[in-house]
């Protein structure tokens, strides 16, 4: 028997604390597979977010630290400037990156820091009980928008990737989803490209946004949550490569 | 060629995503719960082609996919009549 698929050793062999059907588990595995395939496990330092993935350092077998809420790009800046030979990535949720950490990510991109940012967008604050996040889509029911999000009063969903793609310091911005198997493979390819850019010393920030399901706070079954990404979320957050300086120059 | 999947049923949280992506309906929900109280996915391993879709979507990363390697086939004799070539296969 030949092994076609096996858990990568970069992903620690322990149960996760995530809810059934949560996209974080898939994203962690993709990240671990990319790190293994690129052979950078020994020189990678990750930053865990505040949010559901706060315990990411328990699952990824690379050096990781935990920083204040939303400040991952700021700390990563210091880490990369002190250790230019290290591969620095931050793994952030939408509450972390798009709400409290908006200033940090925009300025890290603005300064063209050589970082890789994995941005998990699940349209709610999962850790604190499913409240509305800046990325919550219009009409979506959350704990704090029981009637559905309205544009007057609660505003529009924040499209961070589009914002960052405008900045010259962001060299690679792509939005992927975890809603089905081909999209998951695409997300892995995007993550790999983002890491490769940093390994090549490309002068700027690379960000991969991943639309991820939160079945618990979307109050759906895991398979319905995957379908909801396809039907609703990807309409508001269109998938695809928003910016690739390398390709655009050619 | 046949595939086989191995699911760590004690760690499965029963989200059922592997069941929805399997093109051969090869995975079912187990009738008994595991120690965590979830009803895990259970492999039937009837028509598995080792396409790895279940393993790619599994949020827990607990599915291992194996593919049976084809037995080496060697032609040991051919039929005497040229118009109806037949091969006798020998499995190693």
Image: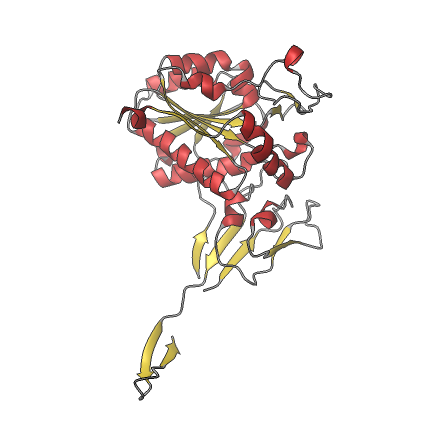
Evaluate whether residue A70 shows in this view.
yes
Q: Position of residue A86 (x, y in %)?
A: 34, 26
Q: Where is residue A114 in the image (x, y as percent from the top left)?
A: 35, 21
Rendered view: A8 above or below A119: below
Q: Position of residue A189 (x, y in %)?
A: 40, 37
A148 relative position to B91: left or right: right
Instruction: Name which residue lies at 31% across and 88% down.
Output: B81
B87 relative position to B21: left or right: left
Front residue (pair A94, A177): A177
Residue B79: quadrant of the picture: bottom left
Front residue (pair B76, B40): B76
Residue positioned most to the front: B83
Evaluate whether residue A17 shows in this view.
no
Instruction: Name which residue lies at 36% across and 70% down.
Output: B72
- Where's the N terminus of chain A, which quadrant? bottom left
- Where's the C terminus of chain A, which quadrant? top left
Instruction: Name which residue lies at 58% across and 41% down.
Output: A15
Rendered view: A198 above or below B90: above
């Amino acid at each position: 028997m030949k092994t076609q698929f096996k858990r990568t050793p970069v992903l620690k062999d322990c149960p996760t604390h995530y809810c059934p059907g949560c996209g974080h588990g898939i994203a962690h595995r993709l990240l671990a597979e990319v790190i293994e395939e690129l052979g950078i496990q020994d020189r990678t330092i990750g930053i865990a977010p505040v949010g559901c993935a706060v315990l990411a350092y328990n699952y990824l077998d690379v050096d990781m630290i935990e920083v204040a809420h939303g400040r991952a790009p700021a700390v990563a800046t210091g880490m990369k400037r002190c250790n230019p030979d290290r591969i620095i990535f931050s793994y952030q949720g939408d509450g972390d990156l798009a709400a409290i950490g908006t200033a940090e990510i925009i300025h890290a991109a603005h300064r063209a820091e050589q970082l890789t940012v994995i941005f998990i967008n699940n349209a709610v604050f999962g850790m604190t009980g499913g409240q509305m996040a800046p990325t919550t889509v219009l009409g979506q029911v959350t704990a704090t928008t029981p009637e559905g999000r309205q544009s007057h009063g609660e505003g529009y969903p924040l499209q961070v990737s589009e914002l960052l793609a405008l900045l010259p310091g962001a060299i690679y911005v792509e939005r992927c989803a975890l809603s089905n198997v081909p999209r998951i493979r695409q997300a892995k390819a995007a993550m790999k490209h983002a890491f490769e850019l940093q390994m090549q010393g490309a002068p700027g920030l690379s960000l991969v946004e991943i639309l991820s399901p939160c079945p618990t706070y979307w109050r759906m079954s895991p398979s319905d949550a995957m379908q909801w990404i396809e039907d609703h979320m990807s309409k508001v957050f269109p998938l695809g490569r928003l910016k690739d300086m390398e390709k655009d120059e050619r | 060629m046949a595939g086989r999947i191995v699911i760590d049923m004690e760690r499965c949280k029963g989200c059922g995503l592997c069941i929805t992506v399997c093109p051969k309906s090869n995975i079912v929900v187990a009738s008994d719960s595991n120690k965590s109280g979830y009803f895990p996915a259970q492999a039937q391993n009837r028509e598995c082609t080792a396409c790895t879709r279940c393993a790619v979507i599994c949020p827990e990363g607990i599915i291992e996919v194996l593919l049976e390697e084809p037995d080496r086939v060697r032609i040991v004799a051919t039929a005497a009549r040229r118009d109806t070539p037949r091969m006798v296969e020998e499995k190693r």
